[in-house]
Image: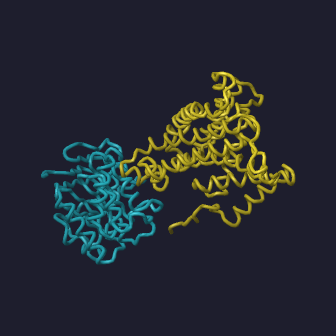
């Protein structure tokens, strides 16, 4: 039964990380640039939940779940602001400019949160209440089940949009060949801004999901963007499926391996796994090998 | 529809200080197929990229009498210009149907109608709507690239080396499809070095050499 609970906890943490990594890839595919403010999008989602929770009446059984639409909206707007301030004005400059500008915007967001809420870790309300549910002899955490469920709904929604709608086809076309997409009349700027909004909203949702069990503080953005980056490197640069798989692998080490060894050892083994992927499959688990035309 | 569909006036394109196109003027009538014939490096691709708005240029471009010189590429497409690039550049990770649908600027019902129109023009694609574009042969990819252009219902087609790498029979199928588009009233401007491919479909041939229109015959030794 212990194994079931560990697997559930790992799956829950991996689900939240997967939302972060998928949001990261959505922006990456639309811009070919790394949004280093993405980690602050997660943090902003957590703090949006903390702030919005004040508006809820007491004794609501599903407080966190009710906050989800508000958190998605706030962080989508934040994503639009990041895109408009840190990307659009300098998109034609070398990629390093976007790296620096998104780092700058990330620091501004972190310091803004610090000034508003203070540096201490905060916790958001539970998604569907606290405690456990007994199932086949195992005690399953309500929060973990809710994280997995919400992630499944958000990912299914994204998959449906990408596969079944004209907007989704435009997203994928822009990711594969942005110039050709423009030459078909697809408005690249619009797709880019929607990517920032959607990607940051996914990050914000992850912030809400993580902020009850793991707390959230304004300085957490750096750690979270590193996890997203590693997940994408493991899974394959630009691959949504790969990002989710990479996120699950990180959670497996952080929860599964750490339970049976120690946190430092698990972290060390995770980075050994990252190095092995880089050595033996540099394109990532779900990536295609890069070919260079001579 | 009659009259000038595409009017290029005094167009010049410079790449890194070197003139790729110098003071070129071309008119293409509705229903007419004009061919820019020239060897590699003559400036065909540069000219077509400038007309669609992907390369910066001086001079002017008018579409159906409207000056589009200041328009973005996206707006030029929405006003009725379509570009089929050299190398096809289909989206490999999208299916055949998705490659076509993504190029439509119309609403759902009209998108489906145009999809059927493309499939009737290119029966080779009709049986493979769910296959990914990378699974197609070169000829089928060329048909897909032209079909993708058709989806936007353009007034003017710009095609860059449409016969490149195609077997003669496939090139003939592509030529027949282009003839059908022209007979439907579309204006077509083709950049091509294969004189044999365009001989049967060209209403007008413009020789391009070193970025300039020349009245002298193109160097036949350089043309295939």
Q: Quadrant of residue A214?
A: top right
Instruction: Name the foreground residue: B128 vs A95.
Output: B128
Please state the horizontal and vertical placement of residue A140, each as a whole percent of the image.
75, 45
A215 displayed left or right of B191: right
Q: Where does the image place residue B187, in percent across and percent down from the top left?
A: 21, 56
Can residue A17 be seen by looking at this rendering?
Answer: yes
B133 lies above or below A91: below
Residue at image location 24% in from the left, 54% down from the top: B156
Question: Which colour represents chain A?
Answer: yellow
Residue drawn 87% across and 51% down? A262
Residue at x 26% of width, y 52% of height = B154
Question: Could you tell me residue B195's position as x and y percent?
Answer: 25, 72
Q: Colour of chain B?
A: cyan
* Horizontal arrangement in the rendering, residue B76 relative to residue B6 (left or right): right
Judge from the rendering whether residue B221 lies leftward or rightward of residue A145; answer left or right: left
Q: Which residue lies at the image location 68% right of the left edge and 22% below the top edge?
A: A58
Q: Is residue A229 left or right of residue B167?
A: right
């Amino acid at each position: 039964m212990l194994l079931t609970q560990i697997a559930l906890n790992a799956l829950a943490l991996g689900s939240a990380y997967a939302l972060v990594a998928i949001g990261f890839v959505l922006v990456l595919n639309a811009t070919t640039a790394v949004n280093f403010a993405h980690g602050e999008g997660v943090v902003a989602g957590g703090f949006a939940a903390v702030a919005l929770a004040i508006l809820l009446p007491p004794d609501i059984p599903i407080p966190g779940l009710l906050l989800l639409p508000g958190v998605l909206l706030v962080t989508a707007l934040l994503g639009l602001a990041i895109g408009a301030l840190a990307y659009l004005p300098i998109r034609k400059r070398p990629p390093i400019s976007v790296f620096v500008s998104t780092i700058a915007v990330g620091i501004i967001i972190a310091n803004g949160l610090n000034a508003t809420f203070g540096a201490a870790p905060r916790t958001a309300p539970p998604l569907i209440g606290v405690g456990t549910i007994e199932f086949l002899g195992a005690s399953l955490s309500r929060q973990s089940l809710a994280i997995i469920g919400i992630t499944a709904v958000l990912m299914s929604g994204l998959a449906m949009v990408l596969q079944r709608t004209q907007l989704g086809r435009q997203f994928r076309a822009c990711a594969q060949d942005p110039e050709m997409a423009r030459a078909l009349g697809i408005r690249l700027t619009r797709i880019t801004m929607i990517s920032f909004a959607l990607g940051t909203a996914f990050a914000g949702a992850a912030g809400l999901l993580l902020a009850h069990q793991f707390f959230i503080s304004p300085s957490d953005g750096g750690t979270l963007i590193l996890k997203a980056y590693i997940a994408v490197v493991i899974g394959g640069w630009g691959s949504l499926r790969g990002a989710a798989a990479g996120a699950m692998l990180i959670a497996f080490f952080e929860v599964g391996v750490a339970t049976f060894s120690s946190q430092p050892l698990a972290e060390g083994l995770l980075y050994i796994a990252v190095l092995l992927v880089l050595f033996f499959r540099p394109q990532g688990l779900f990536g295609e090998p890069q070919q260079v035309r001579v | 529809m009659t009259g000038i569909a595409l009017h290029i006036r005094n167009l010049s394109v410079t790449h890194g200080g070197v003139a790729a196109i110098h003071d070129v003027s071309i008119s293409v009538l509705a229903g007419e197929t004009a061919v820019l014939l020239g060897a590699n490096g003559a400036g065909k691709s540069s000219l077509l990229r400038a007309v669609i708005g992907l390369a910066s240029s001086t001079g002017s471009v008018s579409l159906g009498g409207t000056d589009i010189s200041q328009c973005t590429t996206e707006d030029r497409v929405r006003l009725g210009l379509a570009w089929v690039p050299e190398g096809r550049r289909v989206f490999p990770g999208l299916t055949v149907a998705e490659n076509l649908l993504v190029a439509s600027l119309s609403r759902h019902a009209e998108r489906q109608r145009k999809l059927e129109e493309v499939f009737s023009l290119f029966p080779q694609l009709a049986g493979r709507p769910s296959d990914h574009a990378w699974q197609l042969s070169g000829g089928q990819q060329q048909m897909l690239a032209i079909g993708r252009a058709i989806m936007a219902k353009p007034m003017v087609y710009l095609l860059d080396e449409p016969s490149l790498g195609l077997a003669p029979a496939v090139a003939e199928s592509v030529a027949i499809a282009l003839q059908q588009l022209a007979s439907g009233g579309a204006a077509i401007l083709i950049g091509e070095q294969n004189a044999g491919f365009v001989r049967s479909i060209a209403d007008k041939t413009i020789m391009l050499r070193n970025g300039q229109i020349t009245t002298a015959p193109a160097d036949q030794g350089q043309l295939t």
